[in-house]
Amino acid sequence: MLPSPFRSRAPKLAGWLEENLLEGFTVFDLPPDHRRRMRTSNPLEPVNKELKRLTRVAGIFPNEASLLRLLSARLMEFSKDWETAKIRLRMQNDEPTQKANT
């Protein structure tokens, strides 16, 4: 897949690219309307910001398990919010947008 001069200079990178490059193109399997939203990590930025805030507020954790409990609880809240969101992506272009509780 990759030219041999590249493979000889960076064999680990070449191996990684051969294993993972095609996964980067899976966004093109989605309908065109979804690609813009799914190709970025923008929806995850508020999640990362909130987790960082939580760890700063708590300060020091007595052990790894306590950190994991705190972050897991907040991630479960985010998950519940996403599951009950009113606006969702239509996976078929001919289906109406699904809305929760309608």
Image (spheres, helix red, strand yellow):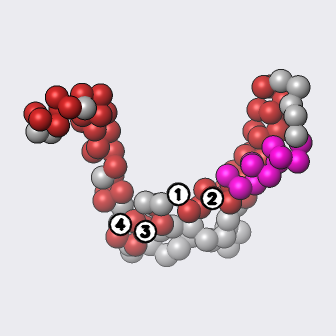
Image check: 1 left or right of 12? left
Q: Nearer the viewer, mark 3 or mark 1?
A: 1
Identity of the residue drawn at 16% across and 28% down = 8
Query: Magenta segment: does it hold 45?
Result: no
Residue 83: x percent and y percent?
A: 66, 56
Q: Which element carries disc 1, helix, strand or loop?
A: loop
The numbered mark, 3 or 2, whose residue comes first in the sequence reads: 3
Q: Secondary structure at mark 3?
A: helix
Crowd band around label 2 with a 10 angstrom C-alpha radius: few (<14), some (14–19), many (20+) = few
State which tag comes first along the sequence, 2 or 4. 4
Of the numbered discs 1 and 4, the one sitting upstream in the chain is 4
User: CA separation, marks 3 and 4?
Assistant: 10 Å
Relative to 101, residue 29 above or below:
above
What's the magenta region? 48-58
- Amino acid type of disc 3? Arg
Q: Which corner quadrant holds the C terminus?
A: bottom right
Asked if the residue at tag 2 contacts the one at tag 3, i.e. Cβ–Cβ closer than 8 Å, the answer is: no
Image mark count: 4
Q: Look at mark 3 in the image and give the residue it sits on.
A: 36
Q: Residue at x 27, y 45 (%)?
A: 22
Say few, some or many: other residues with alpha carbon within 10 Å of mark 3 (under 14 / 14 to 19 / 20 or more): few
Tell me if 8 is positioned left or right of 85 in this view. Answer: left
Quickly name the residue at label 4.
31
In this figure, which residue is indicated by the disc labeled 1? 41
Task: Name the foreground residue: 36 vs 61.
Answer: 61
Q: x, y (%) of residue 60?
A: 87, 34
For the point 43% across and 60% down, the residue is 39
